[in-house]
Image (spheres, rainbow, N blue to C red):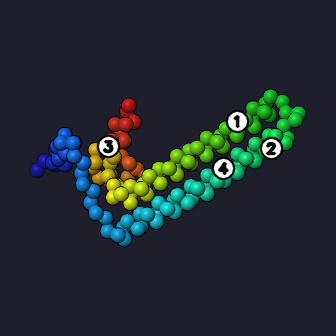
Amino acid sequence: MADTKPVKAAATKAAGKRAVPRARPAAETEKIRSALAERQSELREEYDQHLSEIAELQRDRLIDSSGDDQADTGTKTLEREQEISLANNLLDRINQVERALERLDEGGYGMCERCGNPIPVERLAAFPSATLCVTCKQLEERR
């Protein structure tokens, strides 16, 4: 017997409808919320640490930059820029987790934002703040 999931997904998409999110048991929702909140806390702690390191690098640059040659100045600038880049990356990840928590509250967590199909549990286990199913993510990356 042929698999009808692609046909149903195409029909739902063609009709402009999204798949209806299934209701999660309260215990499952709280388990997900707890894991996301814990991850958010870890990321915020790491972000704060990077901000401290950036401030320290900036302070060191102001205090101890006399007598630096171009190579020293370039090295200090590179270190500061790397810390800023890491901090920005962490901030993006924090925002993704916050969005996942919002989607959990709204009932859309685990549903693809593009096609409306459920995101596989394995994908959510690997990347809890995923907003796209594997197929839609692959299409996005090809662009």
Location of mark 2 (residue): 60
Name above or below for residue 10 compared with residue 101: above
**Residue positioned 39% across, 36% down in the render:** 141
Location of mark 1 (residue): 78
Tell me the distance, in whole angstroms, between the alpha carbons under discs 1 and 2.
14 Å
> Callout 3: helix, strand or loop?
loop
Location of mark 4 (residue): 50
Q: Amino acid at mark 1?
A: Leu
Q: Amino acid at mark 2?
A: Asp
The circle drawn on residue 37 is none
Q: Amino acid at mark 3?
A: Arg
Corner quadrant of residue 71: top right
Would residue 106 be found to the left or right of residue 9 on screen?
right
Residue 136: x, y in percent? 33, 41
Q: Does the rendering let one see residue 6?
A: no
**Residue positioned 32% across, 48% down in the render:** 112
Q: Earlier in the sequence, mark 4 or mark 2?
A: 4
Q: Amino acid at mark 4?
A: His
